[in-house]
Structures are given as C-alpha cells and as structure tokens.
Image: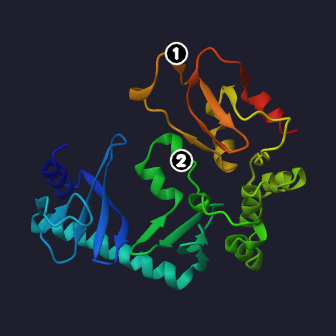
Amino acid sequence: MDINEVLEDLKEGECTLKCRSFYYKNGVFYILVSYKTGYRCESFYYQYGTDYIYDNWNSKEPKTFISDDVKSIIVDCCKKFEERINYCKENYTYIDHHNMSFYYKRIEGTLDYEILEECTDKYCISGPRDYLQFHWEHVKDFTAIWAIRSYRYDSLEKDPLYVSAIQNKDRNLELRMKDFYYGLTKEEEEEMTQITGMRYLRRIADDNKEFEDVYYVCSVNEYWDVLRNSGFRVCHRATFIMRKGMTYSICELNPKKKDGTNAAPVDVKKITFEEFLKLYN
C-alpha cells in the first residue's frame, strides 16, 4: 500500500498506531501501523520536531511529509510511549543482563511478563499483548521472558533473572528459567501445571536418548494453549514458501529445543498430540 494511503487511513481513524522502540541517541521513534482487518501492518520512523517520516531510523532524507493532523496523532503516540518507558523504569524490576539491561514485571492477572529493554542506544518494550495485535495467530505464544533466552550464562545460578526470581519469590519465573537450562524435574513440571492451571511440558535434555529431536504431530490445533503455556515457539510457515508435498495438518515439534514449525512433509511417520503428551509421563 502507498504510504500516503496509510497516512490518510490513519487520519480517518481506519487504522491504529503502536510505538515499538525509541532510539534515544537521536530521538527517533519506530512506529507500527496496524489495520483493524487482517494481519497487515506498515512501519515507519518519526523524529520529534520534524514534518516527515522516514523509512529507516538513521535516514538523512525524509520519505514522506505529513499533515498537521497526522503529525498530531504520531506525536501523541510517541509521548505515550515515553510515558510508558518512564513508568517501567520507576516501577519494574531492574536487571543487568549480558550486553543489555532491562526492566520486567509480571502482567497483572496473567503468568506472562512485560519487558523494557535498554540497549546501547534504544529502548524497546515487549510483551505478549503487542503480538496479539500485530502478528500472526501462530506466534501468540510469545513470552517476553523467552525473548532474551539467547543470552545464556555458564550456569543457572549465575543468571541474574533466575536470581531475581528467587529474591522476589516469583516461583513461576524461577521454574521457567530452570526449564530454560534443562533443569526442570518431573515433580517441578507438575508444579508448573498447578501454577499455570494448564498442562506444562518441560524441556528435554539433549542427551536424553528416550526422546527424538523432532516429532511430527497431528491434531495440534486444539492444544496450541498447552504449547504456548510451556514456552514452545512454533514458527508459522507462510503459504507462499510452502513447498510441494507439505501440509499444515502436521506440526513439527522439537521437545529438546522447545520449538517447531506449523507445517511438515505429508509422508512422514506421525503421532497424535495425545501420544506426544504421553511421552512426558
């Protein structure tokens, strides 16, 4: 869609704005435009005091000039995001984590978290509610804590997030971090089921010979909540890259990595999700 059409829709109230990050080095905001119908969204960058938007956060040439009406909507969105940043810094738990730092807090009434990431030159707020609005159905399993799972320490005890969970008596986070390091016992898996109110599936150690690396599982749709609750990240294979001989009726799941894909080859050895659950018993 032409950006001018997007801006016109924005002025007419046909779409909504969401600020996703702030580059505080030069005062540039990253904005997402979400449409009420479908999953399509557009993105652009805006810098305070200007009358245009950018394609890129450090672009020197403006992409599109904006009217005062649209500018007012964008500036209001940016100000609300700044207010949210300040609120997080004042009320959330601070963690110094590898080459980044962040503030986190349990989202009230849920077992999930919101995180304010503070990187070298930007702030970014992430949480599952963002993904409910802006991403595909298949990635509603996003858990903010899992967003930093690539930052792993030598041991669980050295991970500041695990230490913070113990200090704050957050058993849910404590056990999720323990699971991340392949340390969850069968008893603790059952405890997580009690805490979350839904079946929880622990991460399987790489050296566990009883489990394969990948299982091809049928009838997954009715069990998506179990996978999300357990921290499985199941990627969506878009239709336009679906190869011949693939199907959405079979899901590829890896219990050791806790990930998967919502599509698989048609002619593979497959099991039902009920059989997949029994593997954990």
Q: Which mark is residue 140?
A: 2
Give the percent coordinates (x, y) of residue 183.
82, 57
Residue at image position (49%, 41%) is: 137
Q: Residues within 10 Å of mark 1 (few under 14, many from 20)?
A: few
Q: Position of residue 216 (x, y in %)?
A: 67, 26
Q: How many marks?
A: 2
The quarter of the rendered structure image containing the N terminus is top left
Residue 72 sits above or below residue 180 on the image: below
Quadrant occupied by the C terminus: top right
Tag in front: 1 or 2: 1
SS of the residue at dot 1? loop
Kind of residue indicated by mark 1: Gly
Establish if 120 lies above or below 222: below
Gap between marks 1 and 2 measured at Cα: 27 Å
Q: In which quadrant of the rendered view does residue 184 lie?
A: bottom right
**x 77%, y 75%: residue:** 166
> Is residue 88 left or right of 66 when viewed as pictured?
right
The circle on residue 40 is: none
Q: How is the structure coloured here?
A: rainbow
Left or right of 76, for residue 178: right
Horizontal and vertical percent position of residue 241: 42, 28
- Give amino acid for label 2: Lys
Q: Which residue is mark 1?
A: 245
258 left or right of 212 in image: left
Foreground of the two, 144 or 161: 161
Question: What residue sits 16% from the left and 67% below the top?
Answer: 60
Q: Tell me the element at label 2.
A: loop
Residue 234 in picture, x, y percent from top left: 58, 40
The reply to whether discs 1 and 2 touch (Cβ–Cβ < 8 Å) is no
